[in-house]
Image (cartoon, rainbow, N blue to C red):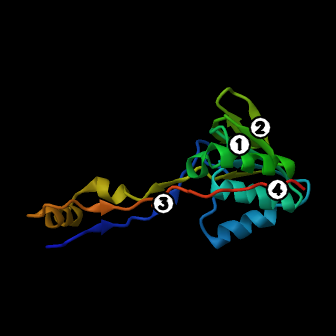
Amino acid sequence: MPYDGLVIATGVRPRRLPGGGGHQLRTLDDALALRERLRPGRRLMVVGAGFLGAEAAAVARKLGCDVTLLEPAPVPLVQAVGNEVGQVLADVHRDRGVNLRTGVTVTEVTEGGVRLAGGETVEGDEVLVAVGSSPNTDWLAARTGPLNRLSELVHAGQKRQPLGLGQVRQPLNTRIVREEN
């Protein structure tokens, strides 16, 4: 099967943590189910301070929830926006009442919250796990039957390798100015 370029777009699935519990946000139904659980005074643990986790923490705080945002990096979104902008985002979250804990690793979702790498348990009514995604490549591992034949067809006489697309982004090169009120 000749081709000039081949993209294998497998899609992704949310990463899970040991313990298996916690909310995931992938669909509108997931978001609506979590929203139904968020009420003033409820304690939400958000694991992961990337775009999804940081935004969910901000929305939950506006809804009156007590929010703890747990992140292994030194500041939120450091890989996407760098340390300086990440620090600005950390300050904004803290200024708005989010309990932001950086430099911590969650090892497990428990019945009443999460467990950290050092053994500490952080209690919460709800847990949102927002720790990224994994590509749906399980079907490639089997490589039997029709799948093996597909592999043979794709590679037969071709000099180009298939390209798998994951997250595609360009470095952020934006100047952010923080105004003091």
Amino acid bearing label 3: Arg
Residue tagged 4: 179
Residue 179 horizontal/vertical position (percent): 82, 56
* Structural crowding at the residue carrying mark 3, measured as other residues with C-alpha within 10 Å and reported as few (<14), some (14–19) or many (≥20): few
Amino acid bearing label 2: Val
User: Tag on residue 128?
Assistant: none
Disc 1 from disc 2: Cα separation: 10 Å
Query: Which residue is pictured at 71% across the width and 40% down the height?
Result: 114
Q: Tell which circle, 1 or 3, labels the residue nearer the N-terminal end.
A: 1
Disc 4 from disc 3: Cα separation: 28 Å
Q: Tell which circle, 1 or 4, labels the residue nearer the N-terminal end.
A: 1
Residue tagged 3: 169
Q: Is residue 1 visible?
A: no
Do residues under tags 4 and 3 come within 8 Å of each other at their CB atoms? Answer: no
Residue tagged 1: 70
Left or right of residue 78: residue 102: right
Q: Nearer the viewer, residue 39 or 52?
A: 52
Q: Tell which circle, 2 or 3, labels the residue nearer the N-terminal end.
A: 2
Amino acid bearing label 1: Leu
Disc 2 from disc 4: Cα separation: 34 Å
* Structural crowding at the residue carrying mark 4, measured as other residues with C-alpha within 10 Å and reported as few (<14), some (14–19) or many (≥20): few
Left or right of residue 81: residue 166: left
Q: Is residue 173 visible?
A: yes
Residue tagged 2: 122
Do residues under tags 1 and 2 come within 8 Å of each other at their CB atoms? Answer: yes
Residue 35 horizontal/vertical position (percent): 77, 66
Residue 30 location, quadrant:
bottom right
Residue 162 location, quadrant:
bottom left
Disc 2 from disc 3: Cα separation: 34 Å
Q: Is residue 177 depicted above or below 124 in this figure?
A: below
Question: Which SS class for mark 4?
Answer: loop
Q: Tell which circle, 4 or 3, labels the residue nearer the N-terminal end.
A: 3
